[in-house]
Image (cartoon, rainbow, N blue to C red):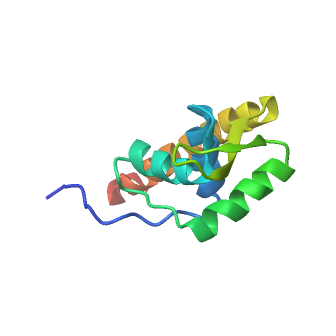
């Protein structure tokens, strides 16, 4: 039986940065908005902890993949709003291609039959 689980999936090493870049590529947003966007675009399957997100945001900003500006959120609180830089867009495309190759390779390996090896 193949049915989707409602329990959040764990992240593989290195996927958080990819998910953050993708979320921010959909529009400028503050940190909490990024958490919500990742949950939304994953159909609720991925829930990111704030304790993991904020170090990733600072790291991506230091690497020049995100830019940040200070502003005020919808609930009138100070917030940092993140957007993708040109380098961030390039990195996102490279990581998407790499991820697709990895997924294809794993799918091929998992579909192997004893008669094929």
Q: How many marks?
A: 0
Snapshot quadrant of residue 40: top left
The answer to whether 77 is drawn above or below residue 83 in the figure is below
Q: Nearer the viewer, residue 34 or 17?
A: 34
The residue under the point 34% across, 56% down is 113
The answer to whether 17 is drawn above or below residue 5 in the figure is above
Residue 6: x percent and y percent?
Answer: 26, 61
8 with respect to 78 (left or right): left
The residue under the point 77% across, 51% down is 60
88 with respect to 106 (left or right): right
Q: Which quarter of the image is occupied by the N terminus?
A: bottom left
The residue under the point 79% across, 57% down is 59
Snapshot quadrant of residue 97: top right
Q: Nearer the viewer, residue 110 or 76?
A: 76
Residue 9: x percent and y percent?
Answer: 40, 63
Residue 109: x percent and y percent?
Answer: 45, 54
Q: Which quarter of the image is occupied by the C terminus?
A: bottom left
Snapshot quadrant of residue 85: top right
Q: Nearer the viewer, residue 101 or 59?
A: 59
The residue under the point 49% across, 43% down is 104
- Which residue of the protein is positioned furthest toward the front in this rendering? 76
113 with respect to 34 (left or right): left
Residue 102: x percent and y percent?
Answer: 56, 48
- Which residue of the protein is positioned furthest toward the top in this rendering? 86
103 with respect to 94 (left or right): left
- Which residue of the protein is positioned furthest toward the left in this rendering? 1
């Amino acid at each position: 039986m193949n049915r989707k689980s409602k329990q959040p999936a764990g992240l593989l090493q290195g996927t958080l940065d990819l998910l953050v870049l993708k979320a921010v590529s959909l529009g400028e947003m503050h940190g909490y908005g990024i958490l919500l966007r990742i949950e939304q675009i994953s159909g609720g399957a991925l829930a990111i902890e704030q304790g993991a997100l904020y170090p990733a945001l600072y790291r991506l900003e230091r690497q020049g993949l995100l830019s940040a500006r200070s502003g005020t959120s919808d609930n009138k609180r100070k917030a940092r709003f993140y957007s993708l830089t040109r380098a961030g867009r390039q990195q996102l495309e490279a990581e998407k291609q790499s991820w697709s190759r990895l997924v294809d390779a794993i799918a091929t390996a998992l579909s192997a039959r004893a008669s094929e090896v």
